[in-house]
Amino acid sequence: MNRLTSTDKALCAVYAVLGLAALIGTQVVLVQYMTSGDVSLFDDVVANGAATFSLIDLLAVAVIALVFMIAEGRRLGMRFLWVYVVLTFAVAISVSLPAFLIARQVHLAREVHLAREREAQPA
């Protein structure tokens, strides 16, 4: 029996499309940057006020998202939360957050399904 409702599937599809777009976008730019020659990542991310603002903003979002993912994941009893931490720092928060949200949606749908099965069993 399919546990995901059409709303669950739609949300997962949106998260997947956005996460895939983020993965492609970030990695294409990263490869272009890394192969461009003189690469000094730290100097470049603080090269001016706009770059520094973007770095601070992104780091704040990443930390907030990680706090949410770990707290929500623990609350729901999700497994492998460490994967999202690794993805955040090894790939991008724009990839790890949608991946977490997909896993969360599937986990919640499974919990609803199991609760309904328990209610349907005769006492």
Image (cartoon, rainbow, N blue to C red):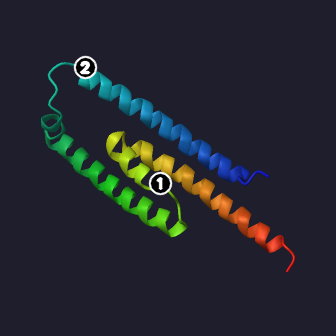
List x then y, in percent, for residue 68: 42, 62
Crowd band around label 1 with a 10 angstrom C-alpha radius: few (<14), some (14–19), many (20+):
few
Which one is nearer the viewer's eye here, 14 or 4?
4
Q: Is residue 4 left or right of residue 89?
A: right
Label disc, if present, on residue 106 of the rendered structure: none
State whether residue 90 is above or below residue 3: above
Which one is nearer the viewer's eye here, 76 or 54?
76
Crowd band around label 2 with a 10 angstrom C-alpha radius: few (<14), some (14–19), many (20+):
few
Question: What's the residue type where badge 2 is placed?
Answer: Thr
> Please, which residue is most extreme toward the right here?
122
- Residue that badge 2 annotates: 35
Identity of the residue drawn at 79% across and 73% down: 119
Q: Secondary structure at mark 1?
A: loop
1 vs 2, front mark = 1
State whether residue 10 is above or below residue 111: above
Identity of the residue drawn at 45% across and 56% down: 81
- Residue that badge 1 annotates: 80
List x then y, in percent, for residue 49: 15, 43
> Please, which residue is most extreme toward the bottom here?
123
The quarter of the displayed image where residue 112 is located: bottom right
List x then y, in percent, for residue 3: 73, 54
Identity of the residue drawn at 35% across and 59% down: 64
Q: Is residue 90 left or right of residue 73?
A: left
The quarter of the displayed image where residue 25 is located: top left
Question: What's the residue type where badge 1 is placed?
Answer: Phe
Distance from label 1 to label 2 (Cα)?
Answer: 33 Å
State whether residue 12 is above or below residue 37: below
List x then y, in percent, for residue 82: 41, 54
Identity of the residue drawn at 73% across and 62% down: 113
Q: Earlier in the sequence, mark 1 or mark 2?
A: 2
